[in-house]
Amino acid sequence: MKNNKVKLYAKALAEILSKPAFIHDKVGTTAWQEKIINNFVKLLVKTGQEKKAKEILNLAEDLLLIKQGKQKIIFETARKMTAGQKRLLESFAKEGDVAKEKISPELIAGVRVIVNGSKQFDMTMRKKLENIF
């Protein structure tokens, strides 16, 4: 279970990033979001939470995607996918979803698909071996 502070920080960051910029100036949305994230990281350092920054940012990304009705899909494989394999797997993602590749040699072979942090499909050699024994 995630630390309550981690959840609190992640929710706060996701909430502020989901709002339109307060001041409409010449700074684009991406620049505005980067500024918010940079200030947020400074806050984490100031409060001694910098070691949890990656966890907080990942959870905030998940919360923001869910709020926008999008998904984060991780394709976990034992080795780097070919361009064709990547295109095939990414074809399952909808427009606006975030698709990432994660290499985990301990899977031996095959693919594991994780949607919004929960396993959805596991066709890895490791899973097959676990089922046998």
Image (cartoon, helix red, strand yellow):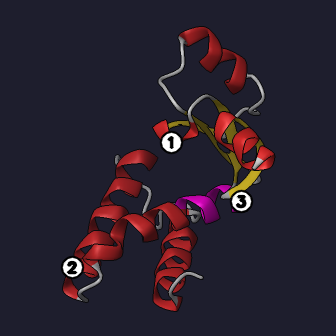
Q: Between disc 2 and disc 1, whose residue precedes?
A: 2
Number of the front mark, 2 or 1: 1
Identify which residue is drawn at 55% across, 11% down: 83
Give the residue pinned by disc 2.
45
* Percent position of residue 73, x then y: 66, 43
Label 3 residue SS: helix
Q: Residue at x 22, y 74 (%)?
A: 42
Query: Cα distance, mark 1 to mark 3?
Result: 30 Å
Q: Is residue 94 left or right of residue 111?
A: right
Magenta span of residues: 61-68
Mark closest to the chain's N terminus, 2 or 3: 2
Q: Which residue is found at the position 38% from the left and 55% from the top?
A: 32
Label 2 and label 3: CA atoms lie apart by: 27 Å
Q: Are marks 2 and 3 in contact (CB under 8 Å)?
A: no
Front residue of 37/129: it is 129
Relative to 2, is 107 above or below? Answer: above
- How far across and how far down the image is residue 120, in percent? 79, 48
